[in-house]
Every structure is written in C-alpha cells, then in structure tokens.
Image (cartoon, rainbow, N blue to C red):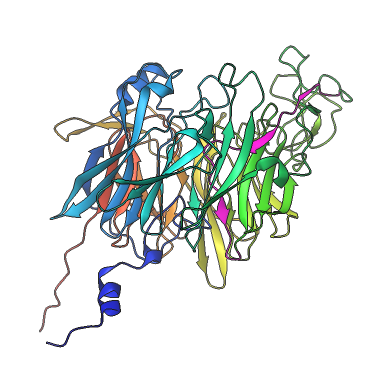
Amino acid sequence: MRRLPLILLLLLIVPRADAQWPQIGANPSHSGHVPVAAQPLLQLMSDIVYDPFVEQEQAASFGDLLVHYQVPLIDGDGVYMEFKSGAFVTPEHWETQDWSIHGLRWQDGTLADRWTAPSDWKPVPANGAAFFEPVFHAVLANGFLYMPAAGGTLMQIDRIDGHLVKRINPFPSFDPNIYVSGVPAADAAGNIYYGAFGLDAADPWGKDITGAWLVKVQPDGSTRAIPFATLVPNAPRATDQCTYFFSGSAPHPLPPSPSAVAPTIPCGSVRPGINAAPAIAADGTIYVAGLANLNPLWSYLVAVNPDLTPKWSASLRNRFHDGCGVLIPYGTSSGSCRAGAALGVDPNDNQPGSGIVNDDSTSSPVVLPDGSVLYGTYTIYNGERGHLTHFSSSGAFVASYDFGWDITPAVWEHDGTWSIVIKENFYEAPQKYFITQLDANLQREWQFRSTNTQACGRAPDGHVFCVDEQPNGFEWCVNAPAIDSRGVVYVNSEDGNLYAIGQTGIVQEKIFLQLALGAGYTPVSIGPDGKIYAQNAGHLFAVGGSRPRVRAVRH
C-alpha cells in the first residue's frame, strides 16, 4: 500500500486548530464561536468532580457558590481542566487551597484522568478587591500548556505527560508578592499575554499596589513586562484625588441636591483587572481592561501595539446618559432620583454614568470582525446590570447596551454581518432573566427568557428530584457562551441545565447536569468532535451523543 506523506498523515491525525478551544472564548478575539456542529444534548458522557469543596463553599456563602472556574480547554481528544485540592477553611483564606491542571483524555468512551500538574499559584489575598474566589486559568499554545504560578510567573507544562518544562519569570527576581492578575491569552503566533501586579505583603489592600505590568511571553520563552502605567497615559496620577460616590449617610434620594458635588478619594495606580483576559485582534493589537486600584470608578479599556507600545487608552468614565429620568424615576424613595437632578446622571455621583472594571467580574474584551472591540462593564445605578461598551479600533466610543455585568459576549458571523450573544439578567423586581442576541449595532434581534420554576438536584443514584420554588425563573450563570457552526447558542443556567438555543431564540434542547444553585458565572466550550463541556456545582460534564439514523424503506 502506498504511504501518505508525513504532512498528510499529520493533517489526518491532528484536528484543525480552529475547531478546538485553547483559551477563554476559543480564540484570540474571544468570539466563542467554532466551525463545527455541536452534538445533540442526549447524555452526560462524563461527570468529573474538580472542586471537592463545593458543599463547604456553599455553607460559607448561604448556599451560593461564589467561585470562578476555568473554561475546559480542548485539544483533539485531550481536555485540560483546573482541579482544586488542599483544604478549604473560610472564604477569607483562599490560600489554604491548592490548584493544578489535570490532563484528561478520551479513551474507549471514557474521559480518563491521565496526569496532574500542580501549581504554586495563589489568588490575591481575600478581604480586598474581590469577593468571589478569583479564577485559576491556563492556556494552550505552541504545543504546551501554560498555567499561572506564584510570583507573577507561568509554568510551561508538557501537555502529553504533564511534566514541568520550565518556569517563565518575566521579572528580574522572584517576588512572591506579585500575582498573575487574570487569565492568560494567546495570539495566533503563540505569543502569550497576561496581567500582573504587586501588593504590599503587610497591608495588601490598605496600601496602593507596588507595581503593575502587561507581560508578553514569546514562543521561545523570552519575556517582556511593560509597566501598566505607561499604557494608560490619560489616567490621573496615583496620588491625585478622583471623584467617588456619595457616602451612605448622604441624604436620600440621591443626589443629595441637584447641584451636589460628589467627594473625592485618591485614585491609586492603574492595574489590570482580576479575572480578565487580554484579547488580540487580527492585526496584533492587544486589548486589556484596567482600573485605578483605590478607586475603580476610574476604569479604562486599553489598546496596545504588538511591540507593547501604547496604541490608545479610552476612559470608561461618564460614558452613559441613562440614569435619572431615563432608567431611574424621579421620586422620594431611596431607589429614585431626587427631583431636579439633571437628566441621565448617575445619582451616586451626580455625573454621567461610568463603566467600572469590577474585580468580581470575569468580563474580557472581545474583538469584533471589523476590528472594533466590546467590553462588559459594571454599573450600579441600573440595578447592578452594568453596560456593554463598544469602541472602534481607533478608540472612539461607538455605543453601549444596558447590560454588561460579568459577560464575555460570543460573536456569530453570518450573512456578511455578525450577531452578539449575551446573558441579560434583571436582578431587581420584577426579576427577569434572558439570553439576548444583539445585532452589530447593539440592537436586540431576539431574546429567550428563563421560565423554569423547578429547582432540581441529582441524588448519588442518579435520580433527579425537583421542588417548585422559583416563580421568576433562574438567573443565567454563563459568563462566556459558546456558538457552533449553525449559530446554535450553548449556555448554562442556575437551574442546573445546559441549554441549546437556536436562532430566533427557540430552545432546541436542554439537559440537566447536577444541581440548581446560585453560582459564580462559568463558561462553556465545544470540542472538535462537537462534544459540549459545561460546569455545575464543581462538576465537569461532557455532553453529547448521536441520534440513530432512520433507514429509508423501499417500496
């Protein structure tokens, strides 16, 4: 038999890279879209516990699970997922836990645990910027796995057997008080980008940071760490006084008077947001989100050239004009605006609304097909729903949408344009929970509303029991949707189900996972064979299956 050339054999054996999920959002732009059709939601093909502390974490948080988790990374038949071990003490002591990446692989229909690569990474200290446990998140690039480690370093891991290849330290020496701030991201050439910042060991959140950087790791392991302040030349100095909110003792409704001037506090140094990943455009531009360390009301979307020189920095301050008299009625209650307040201002500081890079959010920038960029911000005055912001590739503010909290939108290209998929939760009465698709101009195309009222759980024997207790439906707990080649949207809900929602907003299928619970938002990914990977209650599930073919009957 004639032998095929080696390159053809490799092409047959190795799945296409664009059909895999090597990082948050599947690709450098974070679009969350893959060119394969997902499998039907017929069965739970795997159920692996990666967080053994869920019951303790829930007990410490009144039944909620306030933990952020990594997206399952997919490379051919390999799956790479964070696992937790060590000991859970209290939510105020995250550092007692240990984190690792497990290399899983499909063998004879079973997702087998093949190796463990431990990391010495720890989250930033608790009782500070973040209330939710921060995410530990790896990235696949250059044939290796790279995971965060102590001192703002990365560990390069052999993805075949999990051994440590080397520690990559971009700093002159090892400093345990430097932290990888968020999620590493890789561009198409295999360059890896991530944020890092240093804290005072004795008083990490009472004092300003000791430094902040954007780090670039090239495929050969060489590094550069650029001071973050140089990328945000339009930010105030760390010691400058910056506008903050009125105090809780101020007369309500806010603002205290139509002409009231909000107090100021020190800004602090600008640093990258916790949990956020950089996004990389096709031209190599890197997009990162940053905030003033002592006053997050001063936040920024930053564009960086491939050589790590500043491209532009856009302030998120005073971007929205939908406060008093628009989204918030004038009245006398604490949830109203004081009569006479200027139209559209945020009553908390009597200025146009500002987008906040929130350290409990996992929002990451998303590059759109035309090179413009989305970023989901946090805002309080609209029921803590945040705003999705849209900036041009040159840094001009284009538009916003009245929801952006903790969402990395997915983008579906079709018919010469694109659509943007987000969750959209209304947290205040009347509570409503939607998956929303927007067009390229951030106008609604369709919505699907959660109407399930059944809170369910799966017993050890597999039996599912339910209680009717959620009259308003369940919050969507996805932070990064997945979209397959047909435009079908895959999202998880606090009702414990994984949903497949077709275009026009019609549910095609759903499957129950483990437990209905209040949860930190988690991502979904799709493998090259169409299996869907979703998380619930510290379990990793692979979902899929195939329907039997109907044989044609000859007459």
Q: Is 459 placed left or right of 384 in the picture?
A: left
Seen from the viewer's position, the closer of residues 52 and 42 is: 52
Quadrant location, the C terminus = bottom left
Residue 143 magenta-highlighted? no
Across the whole image, how many numbered discs are drawn on residues?
0
Q: Main secondary structure of the magenta part?
A: loop
Q: Is 215 placed left or right of 518 in the picture?
A: right
Seen from the viewer's position, the closer of residues 496 and 32 is: 32
Q: Is 50 placed left or right of 473 in the picture?
A: left
Q: Residue at x 63, y 55 (%)?
A: 373
Q: Residue at x 61, y 41 (%)?
A: 213
Q: Is residue 76 visible?
A: yes
Residue 262 magenta-highlighted? yes
Q: Is 343 placed left or right of 204 in the picture?
A: right
Residue that extends furthest to the front in the rendered view of this protein: 172
Q: Position of residue 169 (x, y in %)?
A: 49, 42
Examine the rendered structure and indicate whether residue 91 appears above or below residue 492: above
Magenta segment = 261-283
Quadrant location, the N terminus = bottom left
Q: Residue 237 is drawn in which quadrant?
A: top right
Examine the rendered structure and indicate whether residue 218 appears above or below residue 466: below
Q: Residue 38 is drawn in which quadrant?
A: bottom left
Residue that extends furthest to the top in the rendered view of this protein: 249
Examine the rendered structure and indicate whether residue 429 appears above or below residue 375: above
Q: Position of residue 433 (x, y in %)?
A: 49, 39
Residue that extends furthest to the right in the rendered view of this protein: 259
Q: Position of residue 492 (x, y in %)?
A: 39, 43
Q: Position of residue 60 (x, y in %)?
A: 39, 17
Q: Is residue 443 visible?
A: no
